[in-house]
Image (spheres, rainbow, N blue to C red):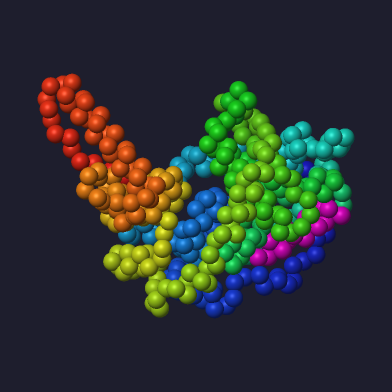
Amino acid sequence: MSQPDATLPRVSHIPDSQPTTALRRRLAELRGPDVAPRPLDARALAALAANPGCRRRALLDGAGVDKGALAEALGAPAPFGRSQFAFSRGHAFEARVKGDGGAELMRLVHARTGAPGTPAPEPGGIAVPDLTAAGPAGRAERTRLALERAAADGGWTLLDHPMLELEVAGAATYLEPDAVAVHPDGRRTVVEIKSFPILDGSADPAKVGAAARQAAVYALALEALGGRVDERALLVCPKDFSNLPAAEAVDLRRQLAATRRQLARLTRLAEIAAALPEGVTFDPARPPRELADAVRAVPAAYAPQCLSTCELAFHCRERARAAGAVEALGREVRGELGGLATLEAVLAAARSGDGGDGGCGPDDPAAAALRHAARLRAEALSAAGSAAGGGAAVPAPGRPRCP
């Protein structure tokens, strides 16, 4: 096992890439005077990028608010998180993969993502720099220096839990991938180590997709440092039901393009915070009614997909249902309904023969399609009633059930 690289210069000055002092102070007020900030990880950032129109999540995540504790205080907790057994199993598998100075991991990197003709890493010939420093900013600077040294040395380098910095909505966010491998040609590959298995050469597509979105966030942070970043990530998982590692290269091009585009659409935190009244705070220790008013002051963009990615999803769903918002039916339905923003408007547009169009013009395509669907429904129910001999009246379209 190679020794930590002690030749890196000491970090004596950290560039001030944090938000402005005024914004930092404002975010601390929103979080609560005695509440430590919750770090924004790649999983949360990938979920935020998938819903860039949600100012509520952007502000709460940017301010480091513990959304789980906030949801608990609001009376709408979400069953998020993994069991302690899953955490222990994941840590044990990662330790096995990175054992012996990263020899096995770098062998997998070479086998799956190495350039043709590149010599395989030799045991004991892998550089493993020491990335410890005070605070996330210090670790990020230490990582930057290690990447520069790895490119200059031209050998195989393994960065174990490096710290990367990425600007999100005008604020610095610190991200910690499982590992980054630097090839002899200077190329950098993100390594994601997961505990879900690869069975007979394939894994759960949903879990692979989530891992790819997280890896894309790390790759974007690496791009900000310059140098060549591999458009493939190495996904390492247990093989079948054993604890032996298996690896596959995952193409990140689509996830990189989508994440880059979505992050660019995020409204800057300073703009969102400036629109809030003075004294607003999301401190979970505050009374529930005060917290509900504070959350209501920040616009949200709820969709059923939020239920699997955001701790506040149950609270937002309850608010969307109470307001009769069509967003509760899903983004696809919301896109098809055009200017019909509430369920009441949708039902009004669907009623035939009463001239209702839900506030849309008579030629509105969405209203016309709804009226046509309502007529088809009435005809089908009438035919079914006649066939049964019941002659039952056809009920008017009812209120749809929200997801």
Image position, residue 57 (x, y; %): 46, 59
Q: Is residue 114 left or right of residue 267?
A: right
Please state, as top left, top right, bottom left or bottom right, where the C terminus lies in the image. top left
Q: Could you say where residue 169 lies in the image, as x and y percent from the top left?
A: 57, 64
Query: Magenta stretch containing residue 143, yes or no?
Result: yes
Residue 221 coordinates in the image, percent (x, y)? 67, 56
The stretch of residues the image draws in magenta is 137-152
* Nearest to the observer: residue 124 or residue 206: 206
Residue 270 sits above or below residue 69 on the image: below
Specify the quadrant of the image occupied by residue 113: top right
187 up-or-down from 52: above or below: above
Magenta stretch, main secondary structure class: helix
The answer to which of 158 and 335 lies nearer the viewer is 335
Q: Residue at x 82, y 49 (%)?
A: 186
Q: Quadrant of the N terminus?
A: top right
> Residue 328 magenta-drawn?
no
Give the image quarter of residue 123: top right
**Residue 332 locus on image (x, y percent):** 44, 44
